[in-house]
């Protein structure tokens, strides 16, 4: 086992992205967001502010919600990443995604991938959230279209549908 | 201008000693990066001066929260999410767990660390006033060994700390003697999550026989460093809470703080809010008695 990992030159970053093992040559300070969008062509995660304020680049890293614009590639080495492209199963939308459609939780779409992953993270930790829990869970994700109400309704609706046998 | 990743070096030693020996070889050359919630923002904006970075994210030696008798030691690499999940902290150091919920949104709480917040040394950091009122110590570590310093005084000026070029914060030490205090925290900002405070207050108080036996007040965003309001405390201590005390305390707080005008607020507004926050706390403390 090497004591020091990483250097200035490109190195092989190994990740599991949406269930698939991938290896890409990147600089260690490359942002995870750029690795996903440029190297892996997974353009669902968006760059909004680029400083961890807006949440539109949200992905799950080892099950935790993170802003991929603030993760240097080297710190993601070996991680399990889930992006919006990995949420649906075999092209079938999840109950959460269906609820966003049914409740009008998506408009222009820029915040939607991040909203869905933040909502997924919340529902995994708390399957029966109150409205206050949903507001808290999505508080790091900004939306300029919906006024948030439809998004909160969609998450609560998804929780109800997921609770059904 | 956007940073070019080819110009930066980042290494990730697997142990704390390996990090420290790297920092000792070229003191000041290696910038530690934990969760990246501050460093990566500067990097993306092209304003990060360091070209060599050493990752300390998720080092096991830095991510423990341990109890040693009358003391809780929080590893400096513990995240805000870790602090919120920890039961002893929620029970005995509520000001810290409340501040942890104010810091950023969930994604930033999953990455931002208590040690990173201290070293970043923002006068507006929400958790730092809590550390002042709990009178915590910091354990600093380098290849030369460890030293324990009081957190009070660690920030010597705006964004300047006592940390030597080859040192890291290893742990934050909290004495377990505050569970009987009435604890109150308040943030005033444009928005609860993701908004940096205009003013924030962490306060502890204990009443005995109708007078304030002990009181601790600290505020963020009212001076160049997070500030303990020692003069205001001395005005309040030993007195009964009535209208004249509240008035004296407001005046003392307004005279003691050193707020500035910036993008988030004005000095005048901050002084008014600081007085209001002290008033609110005294009213609540008076109603709460000793509980």
Image (cartoon, grey):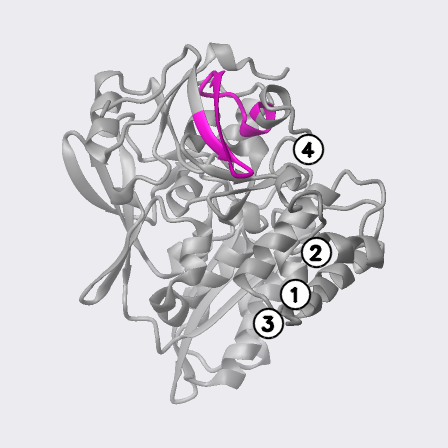
Looking at the rendered structure, whether the residues under marks 3 and 2 are on a common chain is answered as: no
Q: Which residue is mark 1?
A: A162
Mark nearer the viewer, 4 or 1: 1
Q: Which residue is mark 2?
A: A96
Q: Position of residue A165 (x, y in %)?
A: 64, 72
Local secondary structure at mark 2: helix
Q: Is residue A29 magenta?
A: yes
Which image quarter: residue B265?
top right
Q: CA distance from mark 4 to mark 3?
A: 36 Å
Q: Is residue B57 above or below residue A127?
A: above
Local secondary structure at mark 1: helix
Q: Which residue is mark 4?
A: A49
B86 left or right of B269 in image = left
Q: Is residue B14 magenta?
A: no
Question: Residue at position x 34%, y 68% from top?
Answer: B88
Mark nearer the viewer, 4 or 3: 4
Query: Label 4 is found on which chain of the structure?
Result: A
Question: Residue at position x 64%, y 15% from top?
Answer: B1
Q: Which residues are magenta?
A: A14-35
Q: CA distance from mark 3 to mark 2?
A: 42 Å
Q: CA distance from mark 2 to mark 4?
A: 25 Å
Sequence-wise, which precedes: disc 2 or disc 1?
Answer: 2
Q: Position of residue B155 (x, y in %)?
A: 39, 40
Mark nearer the viewer, 2 or 4: 2
B213 left or right of B217 in image = left
Q: Please report contact status of discs 2 and 1: CB closer than 8 Å, yes or no.
A: yes
Q: Please report contact status of discs 4 and 3: CB closer than 8 Å, yes or no.
A: no
Sequence-wise, which precedes: disc 4 or disc 1?
Answer: 4
């Amino acid at each position: 086992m090497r004591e020091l990992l990483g250097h200035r030159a490109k190195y092989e970053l190994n990740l599991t992205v949406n269930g698939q093992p991938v290896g890409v040559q990147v600089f260690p300070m490359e942002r995870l967001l750029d690795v996903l969008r440029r190297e892996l062509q997974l353009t669902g995660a968006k760059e909004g502010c680029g400083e961890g304020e807006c949440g539109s680049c949200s992905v799950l890293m080892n099950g935790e919600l993170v802003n991929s614009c603030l993760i240097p590639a080297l710190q993601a080495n070996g991680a399990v990443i889930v992006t919006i492209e990995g949420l649906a199963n075999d092209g079938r939308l999840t109950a959460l995604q269906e609820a966003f459609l049914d409740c009008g939780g998506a408009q222009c779409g820029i915040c939607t991938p991040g909203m869905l992953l933040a909502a997924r993270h919340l529902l995994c930790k708390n399957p029966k959230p109150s409205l206050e829990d949903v507001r808290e869970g999505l508080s790091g994700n900004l939306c300029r279209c919906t006024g948030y109400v439809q998004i909160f309704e969609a998450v609560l609706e998804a929780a109800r549908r997921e609770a059904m046998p | 201008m956007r940073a070019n990743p080819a110009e930066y070096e980042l290494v990730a030693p697997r142990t704390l000693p390996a990090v420290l020996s790297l920092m000792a070889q070229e003191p000041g050359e290696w910038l530690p990066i934990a969760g990246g919630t501050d460093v990566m923002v500067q990097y993306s904006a092209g304003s990060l001066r360091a070209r060599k970075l050493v990752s300390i994210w998720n080092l096991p030696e830095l991510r423990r929260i341990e109890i040693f008798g009358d003391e809780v030691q929080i590893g400096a690499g513990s995240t805000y999410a870790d602090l919120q999940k920890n039961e002893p902290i929620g029970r005995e150091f509520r000001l810290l767990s409340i501040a942890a919920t104010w810091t950023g949104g969930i994604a930033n709480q999953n990455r931002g660390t208590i040690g990173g917040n201290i070293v970043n040394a923002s006068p507006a950091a929400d958790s730092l006033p809590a550390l002042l009122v709990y009178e915590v110590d910091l354990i600093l570590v380098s290849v030369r060994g460890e030293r324990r310093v009081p957190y009070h005084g660690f920030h010597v000026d705006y964004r300047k700390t006592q940390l030597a070029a080859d040192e890291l914060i290893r742990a934050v030490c909290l004495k377990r003697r505050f569970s009987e205090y009435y604890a109150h925290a308040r943030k005033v900002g444009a928005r609860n999550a993701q908004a940096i405070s205009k003013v924030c207050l962490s306060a502890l108080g204990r009443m005995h026989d109708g007078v304030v036996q002990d009181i601790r007040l600290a505020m963020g965003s009212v001076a160049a460093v997070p500030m303990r309001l020692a003069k205001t405390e001395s005005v309040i201590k030993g007195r009964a809470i009535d209208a004249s005390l509240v008035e004296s305390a407001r005046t003392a707080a307004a005279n003691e703080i050193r707020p500035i005008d910036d993008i988030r607020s004005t000095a005048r507004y901050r002084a008014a809010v600081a007085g209001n926050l002290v008033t609110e706390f005294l009213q609540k403390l008076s109603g709460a008695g000793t509980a």
